[in-house]
Image (cartoon, rainbow, N blue to C red):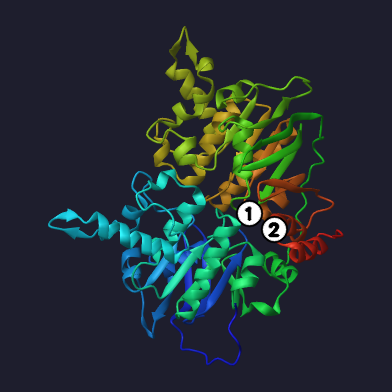
Amino acid sequence: MQPTDSLPIPAPLLTLTGIGKSYAAPVLDGIDLELRPGQVLALTGENGAGKSTLSKIICGLVDASAGAMQLDGQPYQPASRTQAEALGIRMVMQELNLIPTLSIAENLFLEKLPRRFGWIDRKKLADAAHQQMEVVGLGELDPWTPVGELGLGHQQMVEIARNLIGSCRCLVLDEPTAMLTSREVELLFARIERLRAEGVAIIYISHRLEELKRIADRIVVLRDGKLVCNDDIRRYSTEQLVQLMAGELTKVDLDASHREIGAPVLRVRGLGRSGVVQPASLDLHAGEVLGIAGLIGSGRTELLRLIFGADRADHGDIFIGDSQRAAVIRSPKDAVKAGIAMVTEDRKGQGLLLPQAISVNTSLADLGRVSRAGVLDHAAEASVAQEYVKKLRIRSGSVAQAAGELSGGNQQKVVIARWLYRDCPIMLFDEPTRGIDIGAKSDIYRLFAELAGQGKGLLVVSSDLRELMQICDRIAVMSAGRIAETFSRADWSQERILAAAFSGYVGRQEAVEAAQIAGNTA
């Protein structure tokens, strides 16, 4: 699908010079890039490398902190997604932007519904919707079907079709095949080829290296917010691309001499949920920090939610301690009673009562201990909160301060304080340091070492591979919903872990190369 070298090189459609973005810390730094009409540019890198941030800057969803962009040689600085779309710059994001209660037709033309005599022209709308769905190979769908009744793959195709309405000069696709069937992937690739022939430039963001090699002309690799590769994709093997993403890493040893790894506190056997997590088994030991690595969408969070009872498993069992009888965990309440705590990745949406005080949030997991005769003892509650504010170095005016007024790092500490107060022997952490500053991270790392030293078992999901390699005793790697491989400190390397993370998404040849990285035979 790649163009021949004999074709003339068109002038750049989009030029990026020195693009940077900083929040609490730099996310992007000095990105220079050109995108030409009819080019498919593959954008890849580890989780957190800056891929989505860069694409959002291009599409007007985020402002750059530094640098400049040009479109057709003219200054380009969209103030919104709407402005970018008006100039032909479109983006299909991982999070679908559809209204499930409306029909396919209504979602496609929501901002420009055809009207006649003041009423919606249903025939014209249906015909236009049918024609637009034909563009993505799904013209057989009834245009009046509510989007919420479609599978996720078809919803993704509706979103793509919506973004191809009108003038499209540059299309950004962020992990577009994550929810698609093989047939839908083929339809998408066929449409990409037609768009290329029409002169549309495409930025294709994906971890699926087999797909990138198949459809892209050029590969751009980001690592830690910096551009480390911008070259012809045909020059690179899967192994070389993995190494580019990983970079050089000096292994940071975890000093575990002060503690011992004990017997299992949690045994998971064949736990799974159809379409999300394939049957997974693992043991978490007392005094152990077990990491869960993997790409976004690999099933890491979903596995933790199954263990915690937040989602219902279709099959499998969970055993606590040395019990030979499977625990009955149908809800988070059951999990907490069994001694399992979970710090969610969404601290604002699921972890905290933001308008409530630090004291309320701290005691929430065990109100009985700060109550007398069924009545909450506010003084006891405040005393408990003050103890953890001091222990975790939570920066606040007082324990009466609302959790929503704290910084992200201090909010995370409040969530952790709640489960420390509950004193669960099994602690699940989902992205515990996402979006917090270096100082708060260091505090949490020290806390993990302390908890492990007390004999608790910690199961930690993180998109920061360096973080996992610093704090964990073992790392289990998930890929495409299954546990692909588990590494001990003596065996792992960043390259081997990345190879395992990609293993569920690559074809036969790529699997051979990935296995060579991992030191295995295929």
Residue flagged by tag 2: what amino acid is it?
A: Phe
> How far from the left and from the top, in percent, is residue 270?
73, 35
**Which is more toward the observer, 95 or 135?**
135
Quarter of the image holding residue 427?
top right
Question: Quick check: can you spot residue 261?
Answer: yes
Q: Is residue 14 above or below residue 135?
A: below
Instruction: Give the distance between the C-alpha atoms of the residues marked 2 and 1, in whole angstroms.
Output: 8 Å
Residue 418 sits above or below residue 184 on the image: above
Q: Residue 231: name its quadrant.
A: bottom right
User: Mark 2: few, some, or many residues within 10 Å (few <14, many ≥20)?
Assistant: many
The percent position of residue 517, horizontal first and vertical second, equals 80, 63
Q: Do the residues labelled 2 and 1 touch (CB within 8 Å)?
A: yes
Q: Where is residue 310 in the image (x, y as percent from the top left)?
A: 55, 32
Quarter holding the C terminus is bottom right
Instruction: Find disc 2 in the rendering and name its residue.
Output: 502
The residue that appears at 50% across and 19% down in the rendered structure is: 367
Which residue is at the far left?
A: 117
Q: How crowded is mark 1: few (under 14 residues within 10 Å), some or many (20 or more)?
A: some
Q: In which quarter of the image is the N terminus?
A: bottom right
Q: Earlier in the sequence, mark 2 or mark 1?
A: 1
Relative image position of residue 456 (x, y in whole percent): 71, 31
Q: How many labels does the image show?
A: 2
- What's the residue at 56%, 25% (across, down)? 331
Residue under the point 46% across and 24% down: 382
- In the visual, does 449 lie left or right of 86? right
* The quadrant where residue 90 appears: bottom left
Rendered position, 260 above or below 72: above
Left or right: residue 507 compared with residue 258:
left
Note whether 203 is above or below 151 in the view shown.
below
- Look at mark 1 in the image and give the residue it sits on: 295
Which residue sits at x=45%, y=47%? 150
